Image (tube, coloured by chain):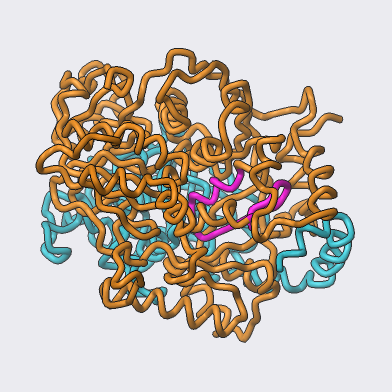
Amino acid sequence: MEPFTRLKGLVAPLNRTNVNTDEITPARFLKTISRTGFAQALFANWRYLGDDKTPNPDFVLNQPRYQGATILLAGDNFGCGSSREHAPWAIREYGFRCVIAPSFADIFYNNCFNNGILPVTLPEPTVLELFKEVEATEGYELEVDLEAQTVTTPDGRVFQFPIDPFRKQAMLQGLDNIGWTLSHLDEIQAYEERRRQEAPWVFSIR
Amino acid sequence: MPKSMFEKIWEAHVVRDVPGESTILYIDRHLVHEATSPQAFAGLKAAGRKVRRPDATIAVLDHNVPTLQVRGRRVLELVDQASALCITTMEQNAREFGITLFDMNDERQGIVHIIGPEQGLTLPGMTIVCGDSHTSTHGAVGALAFGIGTSEIEHVLATQCLLQKKPRSMNIRIEGSLGPGITAKDIALYMIGRLGTGVGTGHVVEFSGSAVRSLSMEGRMTLCNMAIEAGARAGMVAPDETTFAYLKGRPFAPKGALFEQAVEAWKQLPSDPGAHFDTVHEINIDGLAPQVTWGTNPGMVVDVTGCVPDPADEPDPQKRLAYERALQYMGLEPGQKITDIRIDTVFIGSCTNSRLEDLRLAAQIVKGRHVAPGVRALVVPGSMQVRRMAEEEGLADIFREAGFEWRAAGCSMCIAMNGDRLSEGERCASTSNRNFEGRQGKGGRTHLVSPPMAAAAAIAGHFVDIRDF
């Protein structure tokens, strides 16, 4: 897993609620066996005019002032719907390393951690305030510090965000989750033996 | 101390729970399909890892499969090259890792969330995962079932476990009784409209109450299927005699004495009286009208007797903006009567509503009538077994004679990956689960309804209240 420690970067605002993963990466871009090549798929139905190529000048990410943004500011319940990990793949490949929103859908939230994207939850009034500031100030940057669990504004205001302590450590170190679980293989085997006795029908699949 | 069903299942699957660490949770069943798994198998191979429990892993082709057939068989030429590659890659991975695959010409093939319960792969008390958000469906048998991402698929393939933070618990009590023609789909849509698309975030939801108890297994699956549209990772219904009767004799379910032993254990699963839930909601569905979505998320829903809402009446500015955008996308005007909305297409299918009961309800409406001129109407059974049974019962003939296309099983127009899709501006009455922008095809406009409501819309060419149809 790609580690995340600290990031200072340009913020792009997507002021919509309930942005779902079908909107983040439409299903036609899922027809692949590859884990890469999704940068162009990001928000494709909003980003392009008709042909998946010609940029839609009205879409916020196409505005010159947001080019090179690494932090996406989003509305409530971001990433809802389909479990497709293609959504965080597209977000990461486009260049975002952090998404800030009042809330995230569960599966998307989990998927972010597995792809080096830090999902930051801040209270809705704070996020709405940040939307106003981003839109009012060209070149608006935020500083995100995972170790300290803080988001700092250009004028020095500091917002604390919650995060699960294990996930935080995993992200700071870029932990191999699968390797970590496999380091507890003896416990998995012991569980299986015990469970096979208690609930044999679970194991009698064929 | 009294425990909820969720707590009982969770505790029975904890492999390791140490403060400061994520819990290692054991997974009993891993269902796999071709759309989200290729990268997981590739990761496994790159790391030189094996599938830990091929016997507990079942694969099926559903998202990309054609729903048309050539001389009774499905062939790759019916889909584009990209879909074909997803299909052949799944076949190759299943062979290489020794996983049972229901391929597109297997008589057990169908949508992963239809075939799990149908084959008895999905049992009470289990932990079940799949790289698909509608895995919540399987909770209908009293299991803890939830969708995961591709990295997590790889994790389960390699370890048969997941790293989890324990979710909170929610009880949604649904009281009252359904009128004629009103279904679990109407309950689900009404619930999401009332409680919101994010109400279940961070929670596992148990559906309880008199209305849930009287639902068939099919109805419970529809309700749990839509739990994800309320933001819940998982939905569940306590197992009871309805559940046991449904599971008995299913191909992969335990047999004989082992089944009896399992039933005794399953009877201990329901939440104890007085069990704690972090959040509780109550809904009454007496007098519930058929529900129709008008917007671009399942919470944007009204009674069929109602009208498209006016964003100007919405006090919350964020919501007002969302309503305005939705009306623009959907091509609707505030105040327009729902029954005045004309449709181009009808899709009866998806993991929400493509079981035999759904097709029976739709066929009852269709029988002796004909699809309205200019309307394209599809029935895509959830599995080849459902299709076969519907043919034996004469349902297929009813649909065909009425002018519906009768297809082979798959996800089809719910996700529009296999070529079955809406074109720009095309308006669809759909029994699926998501009315998101572009979900059924770029620019397509989706209205979510129950199977009888979709059937009636096909006949009339616009939405109608099935209570006076």
**For residue B111: magenta?**
no
Q: Nearer the viewer, residue A193 or A3?
A: A193
Q: Report the residue at 62% width, 27% height from top.
A: B213
Q: Nearer the viewer, residue B339 or A69?
A: B339
Q: Is residue A84 left or right of residue B41?
A: left
Q: Nearer the viewer, residue B336 or B382?
A: B382
Which contiguous range is marked in magenta?
A: B120-139
Q: Quadrant of residue B174?
A: top right
Q: Which colour denotes chain A? A: cyan
| Quadrant assignment for the C terminus of chain B | top left
**For residue B122: magenta?**
yes
Q: Residue furthest top?
A: B287
Q: Which colour denotes chain B? A: orange
Q: Quadrant of residue B51?
A: bottom right
Up/down of B55 relative to B190, above or below: below
Q: Position of residue B340 (x, y in %)?
A: 15, 24
Up/down of B180 relative to B37, above or below: above
Q: Report the residue at 38% width, 56% height from top.
A: B411
Q: Is residue A132 visible?
A: no
Q: Position of residue A90 (x, y in %)?
A: 35, 64
Tag count? 0
Q: Position of residue B50 (x, y in %)?
A: 65, 81
Up/down of B232 relative to A23, above or below: above
| Quadrant assignment for the N terminus of chain B | top right
Q: Is residue A53 left or right of residue B3?
A: left
Q: Position of residue B71 (x, y in %)?
A: 30, 72
